[in-house]
Amino acid sequence: MKTISSTVKQFIPTSLEEMDDVKLLNRVDTKFVCSISKLTEILKDLSEFYKVLEIKDQRIMSYRTKYYDTSDFKMFYEHQNGKLNRYKVREREYINSDLNFLEIKFKNNKSRTLKFRIMRPNNFNRFSNDEIDFLDYKLPFCSEELEVKLHNTFRRITLCNHAERITIDFKLKFEDDNGSKSVLPFLAIIEVKQDIYSVNSDVIKILKKHGVRSNSFSKYCIGTTLVYPQLKSNRLKSKMLLINKISA
């Protein structure tokens, strides 16, 4: 962790305000999974091409996420089965910037990700009337069906240039409301967010150089599989084998 922290200091910093031009709320997401042991060398190469988000002198941020689903895990199964025009509902707390959002992510049938969000108070357990209206308008099912299914914490490094955002998540922890826990301390999830996918992207080239290939990875689906082992998750078997291989 100290090596990662010192490497991140090599980047030119940027602020949330400066990143506003690269919000990419309608985008193409490409994910990569690798061992955290590779991060330092990958970051060294990326520092030539990208700036790092800095908030209150911090460049490695803490995030806390609360995922919602229906009682029968409808969104989990739709994602696991590869259904397009699918949804994910979460409350995400951006701890370092003291922001909290209720967010809906929509993956359409053209494999583009659209994100909608509204701010909400911290530590507020019930949906407000405005939040209910937001959920009922954007979702194909009623907000009353939603239950908290998974809690997730992680650390994140956010990089950007004029056209891309890159998030690097690690120190993943998952927990349900009954205290069932799982941690993946050896794993790093790199997500490249672009308006249009480009193989000529510097980050894509650098990841290929380090032998890291694209691999879809949902923190919600993997976390749910880990803390709810009774759920059917055959379609995620290859992801679990990859996790086990990286951890070996």
Image: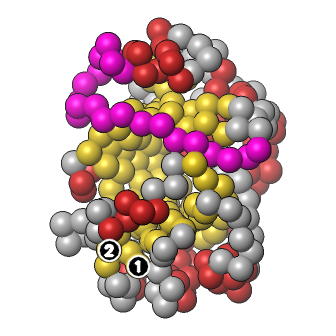
Residue shown at 64%/26% (left/top)?
Answer: 75
User: Amino acid under label 2?
Assistant: Thr
User: Quick check: 105 above or below 50?
Assistant: above
Number of residues whose C-alpha sits closer than 10 Å to that of mark 1, classed few (under 14), some (14–19) or many (20 or more): many
Among the 4 quarters of the image, the one containing residue 189 = bottom right
Of 162 and 244, which appears nearest the observer? 162
Question: How far across and down, in percent of the image, does residue 74 sit?
Answer: 66, 21
**Whether residue 91 can be seen here:** no
Q: Position of residue 108 (x, y in %)?
A: 70, 38
Residue 130 visible at all = yes
Label pair 1/2, CB-CB below 8 angstroms: yes
Q: Which residue is mark 1?
A: 51
Identify whether 161 is placed above or below 67. below
Figure quadrant of the N terminus? bottom left
Q: How is the image coloured?
A: secondary structure
Residue interval drawn in magenta: 110-131
* Residue picked out by circle 2: 14
Q: Earlier in the sequence, mark 1 or mark 2?
A: 2
**What residue is shown at x 61% (from left), y 53% (from top)?**
27
